[in-house]
């Protein structure tokens, strides 16, 4: 009877070791998969240092605000076309030029806001990564799709 108990205990131990090996293998596979997914992400500011990224974030947000302020002022400065004969065409040309400049400023402001959002996204990703142990545990245990 003692022999049966030892066989049962060794069978359970073997099952436990096999389950542990399966979990370690699944964790290693998940780690490699998550690293590949992270590297496949498009992150144009990944190579910048944290200090450079912080400076770029501050500068891009400041420039976006400045250009947006100029754009808002140019939109407010639009005037109606005059009703005089020959002056009418000149006024139309000036209004058309101001409209084109306002559109260009609006496009530039949108581009700067998009760039600032991308830099902010990279900054937030880095802030959320945490310590090396946190990154390791996330890569092993989180199923990303």
Image (cartoon, rainbow, N blue to C red):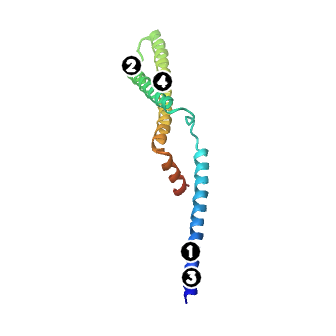
Q: Dot 2: few (<14), some (14–19), or many (≥20) neighbours within 10 Å?
A: few
Q: Dot 4: few (<14), some (14–19), or many (≥20) neighbours within 10 Å?
A: many
Q: Position of residue 62 (x, y in %)?
A: 42, 25
Q: Position of residue 17 (x, y in %)?
A: 58, 70
Answer whether labels 3 and 4 touch (C-beta < 8 Å). no
Mark 2: secondary structure:
loop
- Residue on which the image places disc 3: 6
Give the mark nearest the N terminus, 3 or 1.
3
Residue that appears at 52% across and 57% down: 141
Q: CA distance from mark 3 to mark 2?
A: 92 Å
- Residue on which the image places disc 4: 105
Mark 4: secondary structure:
helix
Of 20 and 3, nearer the camera is 3
Mark 1: secondary structure:
helix
* Camera-side mark, 1 or 4: 1
Q: Position of residue 46 (x, y in %)?
A: 56, 37
Answer whether labels 2 and 4 touch (C-beta < 8 Å). no
Q: Position of residue 93 (x, y in %)?
A: 49, 15
Give the mark nearest the N terminus, 1 or 4.
1
Of 29 and 65, nearer the camera is 29
- Residue on which the image places disc 1: 13
Residue 77 numbered mark, or none: 2
Q: CA distance from mark 3 to mark 1?
A: 10 Å
Mark 3: secondary structure:
helix
Q: Quadrant of the N terminus?
A: bottom right
């Amino acid at each position: 009877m003692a022999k049966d108990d030892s066989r049962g205990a060794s069978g359970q131990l073997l099952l436990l070791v096999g389950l542990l090996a399966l979990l370690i293998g699944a964790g290693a596979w998940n780690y490699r998969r998550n690293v590949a997914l992270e590297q496949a992400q498009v992150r144009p500011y990944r190579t910048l240092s944290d200090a450079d990224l912080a400076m770029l974030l501050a500068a891009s947000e400041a420039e976006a605000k400045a250009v947006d302020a100029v754009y808002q002022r140019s939109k407010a400065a639009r005037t109606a076309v005059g009703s005089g004969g020959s002056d009418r065409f000149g006024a139309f040309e000036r209004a058309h030029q101001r409209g084109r400049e306002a559109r260009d400023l609006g496009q530039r402001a949108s581009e700067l806001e998009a760039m600032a959002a991308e830099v902010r996204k990279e900054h937030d990703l880095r802030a959320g990564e945490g310590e090396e142990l946190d990154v390791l545990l996330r890569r092993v245990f989180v199923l990303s799709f």
